[in-house]
């Protein structure tokens, strides 16, 4: 593994990406890139009416993450500095393939590839897998107003989409190391020992 790895934490909604990446950033003394959530002007409306708001929402996420990734490249990756992010840019495609339809989906896919195909990809992906009940209880625990009443079918579909996407990334980007964590049984929030096992594994990979 190269000396200055680019690490991304991924998984479906509420899997614990921000929590785990923040803990790892602290433990490994890494700068962290977090996705923008609260400032998103479309997210409330999207959860109320996905058909009407998905294109605006997906484009907003894509533009934001593209800009963040450009900044991350300039500040860290191009300078050979390690960095951890609580998402992989590929998540745009995972969500948009599910929420968009027809011509909008085709156009979005093209824009996604134009913007991102030449950008560096993470060296390590930490993929947190969790089932529907676990995600629903974590989402409830976090208690964001716009996620109240989140559609279970949508969440279940995303769980499956993530599995397919990770398998496809393993083929598309064979040099990327994917570390899969069972978010149902591993409690990296309350159980220090379990967190340390994860951080030891990441340390081993980046040394
Ligand atoms: N493994 C875990 N064990 C116990 N609690 C957890 C675990 N992972 C996350 N949590 C809790 O679940 C909630 C959601 O976690 P977090 O916000 O990190 O998820 P996320 O994947 O970043 O969500 P989003 O997809 O919305 O960005 C938080 O309250 C967090 O403390
Ligand atoms: N549709 C859609 N596309 C995305 O790229 C995307 N990224 C995150 N989210 C949702 C999940 C959480 O509710 C909340 C915070 O992660 O925003 C997304 N929703």
Image (cartoon, rainbow, N blue to C red):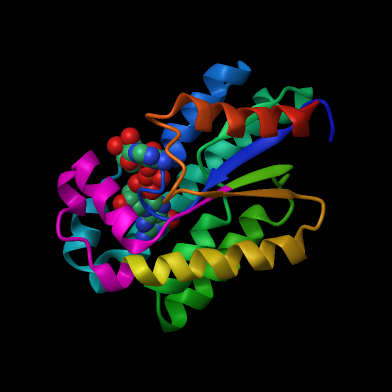
Q: Residue at x 74, y 52 (%)?
A: 118
- Quadrant in the picture for residue 31: top right
- In the rendered image, residue 136 lying in the magenta stretch gets the answer yes
Q: Is residue 2 left or right of residue 105?
A: right
Measuring from the top left, give residue 117's x and y in whole percent. Answer: 70, 57
Q: Compared to 38, does 52 lie above or below?
A: below
Q: Nearer the viewer, residue 171 or 57?
A: 171
Q: Compared to 132, does 13 lie above or below?
A: above
Measuring from the top left, give residue 6's x and y in whole percent. Answer: 69, 35
- In the rendered image, residue 95 lying in the magenta stretch gets the answer no
Q: Residue at x 52, y 56 (%)?
A: 91
- Quadrant in the picture for residue 101: bottom left
Q: Quadrant of ligand 1?
A: top left
Magenta range: 127-154
Measuring from the top left, give residue 69's x and y in whole percent. Answer: 59, 39
Q: Is residue 125 left or right of residue 46?
A: right
State the predominant SS element of the stretch in magenta: helix
Image quadrant in which the C terminus is located: top right
Q: Residue at x 51, y 63 (%)?
A: 162
Q: Compared to 134, does 84 lie above or below?
A: above
Q: Residue at x 51, y 44 (%)?
A: 65
How many marks on residues?
0
Measuring from the top left, give residue 28's x and y in whole percent. Answer: 62, 19
Q: Nearer the viewer, residue 204 or 169?
A: 204
């Amino acid at each position: 593994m190269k000396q200055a790895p680019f690490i991304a934490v991924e998984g479906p909604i509420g899997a614990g990406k921000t929590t785990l990446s923040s803990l790892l950033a602290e433990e490994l003394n890494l700068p962290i890139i977090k996705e923008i959530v609260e400032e998103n002007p479309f997210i409330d409306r999207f959860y109320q009416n996905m058909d009407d708001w998905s294109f605006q929402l997906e484009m907003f996420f894509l533009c934001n993450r593209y800009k963040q990734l450009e900044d991350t490249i300039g500040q860290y990756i191009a300078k050979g500095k390690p960095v951890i992010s609580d998402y992989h840019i590929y998540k745009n495609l995972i969500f948009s393939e599910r929420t968009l339809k027809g011509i909008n989906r085709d156009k979005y896919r093209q824009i996604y590839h134009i913007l991102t195909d030449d950008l560096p990809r993470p060296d390590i992906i930490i993929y947190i897998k969790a089932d529907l009940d676990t995600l629903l209880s974590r989402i409830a625990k976090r208690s964001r107003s716009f996620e109240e009443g989140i559609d279970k079918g949508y969440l279940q579909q995303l769980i499956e989409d993530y599995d397919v996407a990770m398998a496809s990334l393993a083929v598309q980007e064979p040099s990327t190391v994917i570390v899969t964590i069972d978010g149902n049984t591993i409690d990296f929030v309350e159980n220090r020992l379990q967190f340390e096992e994860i951080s030891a594994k990441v340390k081993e990979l980046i040394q």
